[in-house]
């Protein structure tokens, strides 16, 4: 993965590997057990300047490549799925601001560098049926340059811990549900009323309860680029790429634990390979399919970004990155479950070196992060007309 | 040109599910801002292919190409439909 990376990209990958190993990994079980925010890992990311790697170099950031950030998602995912997912979701927000640069947001991007601000997204909304491409809440008409908004969000990942938020809203009170904009707001401009607890099956450290959010902000914090363009060119494909690298990381660690289990069994009884070795071999091919899809999609994303970003609006391209999400979110739990089959009771128990319960539970969240059912519905419609898929 | 745009408007009227009457919109007005959803836009594309007996290329199958009556007319021109 390291071929062709710039020095800064290499530094990012090395820092993420170190944080994964020394900070995220040792806290992963505690984060999971208590469904608490992985603050040690996020603090370590801040100290290493990882929260601003996607900020362009002329604004003081590292201008990191998608490939390097994806590799960091993978490295963190191998040690703590929740830390990796918080990192991934933050990077997606910064990437949207950096790839759709608007002058009024440059100062904010400099602040992200200087203060290592953590950014969350408020995209899901009660009453939209899970469709990110439509909103109920809207930006009010400016009054002396000030606008307000209110939104009922069923989940906001790390909502209690983020410094700033990017929220999808209808452009004006009269706008249609699909005429959306992306709005930046800071914690001190917002009221956030928690609406639910957070006690889920997996990815417990992402701390993603629901909130009713109200904000009062200067009108300049509303992006002018239509959200549909940001979503097609950046937010949707990048989400699928970074998330799937996290899931690949989780699945890879589950595989590594299964391999360690088989190796330990082989050492105890030298001679014939242990029965689980065959299962491990089967598992390797499943992991390899997942890795192939995740890495190929990343390469295609880089190629399209470099060649002609308007191609992201083509239905065939939208289908391609939707396929990545569906395939990776279905394959990752298969790999984790396979690892549990290899490790048996030692994998099922939560306190052995071969435990894969957390991996399996974390990977089960994948099919819900923008529900696969919703993506299939979109794809089914696009497939009626798209040709080369 | 008017005949072609009238046919386009007819297709939009039947399949676009706009929140306003398409005849109240200018040729360059955004159909999405008039409430056409992604799903409705796919139905518009299929109906256009059917009505004009053409096939859009994949490179044309994107949101901006079906943004307005004007942009649809331009796309049809590119696949050989004459006004």
Image (spheres, coloured by chain):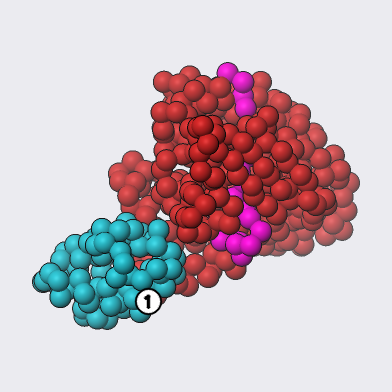
Chain colours: A red, B cyan
* Coordinates of residue B30 in the picture (x, y in percent): 33, 58
Range drawn in magenta: A113-132
- For the residue pair A107 and B56, the one nearer the viewer reads as A107
* Coordinates of residue A72 in the picture (x, y in percent): 58, 36
Helix, strand or loop: magenta stretch: loop
- For the residue pair B39 and A389, the one nearer the viewer reads as B39
Q: Is residue A56 above or below residue A245?
A: above
For the image, the number of numbered tags is: 1
Q: Is residue A268 above or below residue A318?
A: above
* Coordinates of residue A288 in the picture (x, y in percent): 56, 55
Magenta highlight on residue A122: yes
- Image quadrant where residue B27 sits: bottom left
Q: Which residue is mark 1?
A: B15
Residue occupying the point 67% across, 36% down: A190
Which quadrant would the C terminus of chain A be assigned to in this image? bottom left
Q: Is residue B73 above or below residue A54?
A: below
* Coordinates of residue B7 in the picture (x, y in percent): 22, 77
Query: What is the crowding at mark 1: few (fewer than 14 residues within 10 Å), some, or many (at least 20)?
Result: many
Q: Is there any visible trace of residue A356 in the rendered image?
A: no
Residue occupying the point 47% across, 55% down: A175
Q: In the orientation shown, which residue stands out farthest toward the front? A: A144
Q: Is residue A226 rendered to the left or right of residue A140?
A: left
Residue occupying the point 52% across, 52% down: A173
Residue occupying the point 39% across, 68% down: B20
- Image quadrant where residue A214 sits: top right
Q: Is residue B20 rendered to the left or right of residue A80?
A: left
Magenta highlight on residue A376: no
Mark 1 element type: helix
Q: Is residue A129 rendered to the left or right of residue B4?
A: right
């Amino acid at each position: 993965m390291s071929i062709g990376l710039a020095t800064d990209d290499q530094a990012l990958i090395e820092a993420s590997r170190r944080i994964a190993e020394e900070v995220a990994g040792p806290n992963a079980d505690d984060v999971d057990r208590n469904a608490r925010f992985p603050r040690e890992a996020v603090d370590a990311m801040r100290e290493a300047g990882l929260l601003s790697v996607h900020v362009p170099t002329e604004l003081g950031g590292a201008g990191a490549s998608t490939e390097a950030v994806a590799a960091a998602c993978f490295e963190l995912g191998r040690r703590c799925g929740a830390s990796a997912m918080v990192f991934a979701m933050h990077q997606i927000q910064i990437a949207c601001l950096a790839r759709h640069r608007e002058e009024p947001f440059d100062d904010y991007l400099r602040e992200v560098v200087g203060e290592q601000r953590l950014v969350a997204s408020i995209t899901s909304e009660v009453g939209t049926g899970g469709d990110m491409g439509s909103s109920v809440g809207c930006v009010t008409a400016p009054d002396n340059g000030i606008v307000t908004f209110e939104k009922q969000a069923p989940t906001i990942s790390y909502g209690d811990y983020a410094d700033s938020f990017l929220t999808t809203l209808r452009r004006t009170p009269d706008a249609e549900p699909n005429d959306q904009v992306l709005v930046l707001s800071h914690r001190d401009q917002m009221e956030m009323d928690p609406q639910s607890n957070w006690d889920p099956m997996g990815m417990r450290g992402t701390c993603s309860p629901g909130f009713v959010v109200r904000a009062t902000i200067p009108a300049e914090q509303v992006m002018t680029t239509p959200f549909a363009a940001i979503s097609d060119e950046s937010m949707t494909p990048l989400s699928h790429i970074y998330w799937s690298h996290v899931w690949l990381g989780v699945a890879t660690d589950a595989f590594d634990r299964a391999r360690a289990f088989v190796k330990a069994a082989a050492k105890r009884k030298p001679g014939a390979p242990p029965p689980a070795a065959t299962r491990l071999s089967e598992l390797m091919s499943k992991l390899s399919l997942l890795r192939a899809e995740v890495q190929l999609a990343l390469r295609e994303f880089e190629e399209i970004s470099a060649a002609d970003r308007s191609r992201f609006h083509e239905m065939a391209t939208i289908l391609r990155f939707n396929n990545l999400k569906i395939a990776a979110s279905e394959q990752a739990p298969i790999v984790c479950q396979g690892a549990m089959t290899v490790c048996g009771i030692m994998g099922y128990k939560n306190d052995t070196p071969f435990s894969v319960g957390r991996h399996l539970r974390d990977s089960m969240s994948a099919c819900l992060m923008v529900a696969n059912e919703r993506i299939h519905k979109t794809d089914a419609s696009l497939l009626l007309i798209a040709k080369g898929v | 040109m008017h005949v072609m745009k009238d046919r386009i408007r007819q297709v939009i009227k039947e399949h676009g599910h706009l929140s306003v009457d398409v005849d109240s919109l200018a040729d360059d007005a955004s159909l999405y801002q008039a409430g056409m959803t992604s799903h409705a836009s796919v139905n518009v594309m299929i109906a256009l292919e059917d009505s004009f007996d053409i096939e859009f290329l994949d490179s044309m199958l994107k949101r901006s190409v079906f943004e307005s009556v004007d942009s649809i007319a331009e796309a049809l021109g590119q696949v050989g439909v004459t006004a």
